Image: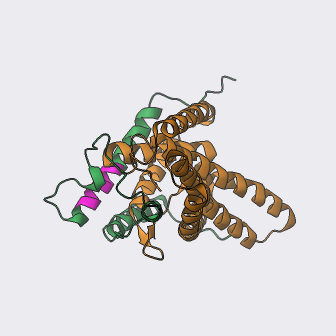
């Protein structure tokens, strides 16, 4: 879902860059207050993991492939602000060193994947899981919510990406949103499964490291 | 919720094994277009992509001399090291707030 150079025009690139820079500035201020020295190795490990995981494209359906984005996973393990921050760093490294995502589209990619994708997934997970905890002690609904939030984090990023493409070019927004949301509904399914699997694996070994369980 | 009680050493070994497994799987990454590439093709925007600033390891390639698998493993290691370094540098001088009481 990393937009390359050439697909966005100057107004869309500029607007998304300003939104992302402003959001990251606010997140950085929050992060400075919450920061603990112990979280640095976890942040480095998770960023490294997400970087490699994003290199692994898995065939999905209809001649397309998808990979783990990892935004919700990062937010669940480290908290939403830290999650968005390290996702942004991953996207920056991918663009600057590996040309995976354009320099002019860096703001848009950070906005779609790190800020909106991760943020929306975390907000939905947080809201729904709090409601569920009040009504049941079973683990299953929580896992369904986690799966759904991970799926949603991909869909939100995909829809935003489609809207930016249609704003920048001459493609109809309905067509762009329809295509992007359809293909990413399948990729989101993969995201949900992988996020669920990794979350459960970490929870079974080191639940103390998981932000949402503290 | 059942928790596995494992020593620190075993936990580190599991972590290292996990990363090695990821690196191995990365060599089998699919070449099929991702969701955005597929959409761009369907929208007739294919060919609009251009390079504004060439990256040193563009398309996860260190050198044409190496096989695609070696290139992927090397770039994965470089990317992981870069991210870890950047995060440690950003937070190197940042200390957790000290409780003065």
Q: Which lettered chain is shown in green?
A: B
Magenta range is B71-79
- Residue shown at 58%/36% (left/top)? A19
Q: Most extreme residue toward the left, as rendered?
A: B65
Q: The orange chain is which one?
A: A
- Comparing A178 with A83, the one in front is A178
Name the one closer to the observer, A28 or A66.
A66
Identify whether B50 is placed above or below A124: above
Residue sitting at the far top: B100
Nearer the observer, A34 or A143: A143
Q: Is residue A79 visible from the viewing direction of this image? A: no
Q: Is the magenta stretch mostly helix, strand or loop?
A: helix
Measured as percent of width and height from the top left, residue A200 is found at 60, 67
Image location (x, y in percent) of residue A40: 49, 42
In the rendered view, does B81 fall on the left or right side of A175?
left
Who's the residue at 41% across and 54% down the image? Answer: A51
Residue A88 drawn at (x, y percent): 49, 44
| Residue at point 55%, 46% (across, down) | A167
- Looking at the image, is A102 positioned above or below residue B59? above
Viewer-closest of B57 and B40: B40
Q: Where is residue A24 in the image (x, y as percent from the top left)?
A: 56, 35
* Residue projecting furthest to the right: A135
Q: How many labels does the image show?
A: 0
């Amino acid at each position: 879902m990393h937009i390359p150079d050439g697909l966005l025009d100057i107004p869309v690139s500029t607007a998304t860059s300003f939104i992302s820079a402003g959001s990251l500035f606010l997140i950085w201020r929050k992060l400075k207050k919450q920061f603990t020295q112990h979280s640095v190795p976890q942040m480095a490990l998770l960023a490294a993991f997400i970087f490699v995981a994003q290199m692994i494209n898995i065939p999905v359906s209809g001649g397309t492939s998808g990979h783990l984005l990892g935004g919700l996973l990062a937010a669940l393990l480290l908290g939403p602000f830290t999650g968005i921050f390290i996702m942004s760093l991953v996207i920056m490294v991918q663009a600057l060193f590996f040309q995976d995502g354009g320099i002019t589209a860096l703001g848009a990619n950070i906005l779609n994947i790190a800020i909106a994708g991760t943020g929306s997934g975390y907000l939905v997970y947080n809201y729904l899981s709090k409601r569920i905890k009040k009504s049941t002690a079973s683990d299953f609904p929580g896992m369904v919510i986690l799966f759904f939030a991970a799926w949603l984090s991909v869909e939100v990023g995909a829809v935003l990406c489609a809207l930016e493409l249609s704003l920048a070019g001459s493609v109809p927004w309905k067509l762009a949103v329809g295509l992007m949301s359809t293909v990413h509904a399948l990729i989101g399914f993969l995201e949900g499964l992988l996020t669920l699997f990794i979350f459960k694996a970490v929870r079974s070994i080191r639940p103390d490291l998981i932000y949402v369980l503290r | 919720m059942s928790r596995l009680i494992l020593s620190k050493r075993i936990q580190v070994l599991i972590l290292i094994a996990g990363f090695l497994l990821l690196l191995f799987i990365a060599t089998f990454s699919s070449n099929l277009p991702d969701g955005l590439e597929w959409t761009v093709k369907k929208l007739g925007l294919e060919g609009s992509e251009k390079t504004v600033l060439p990256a040193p390891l563009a398309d996860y390639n260190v050198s044409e001399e190496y096989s695609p698998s070696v290139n992927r493993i090397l770039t994965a290691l470089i990317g992981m090291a870069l991210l870890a370094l950047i995060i440690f540098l950003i937070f190197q001088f940042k200390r957790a707030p000290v409780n003065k009481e």
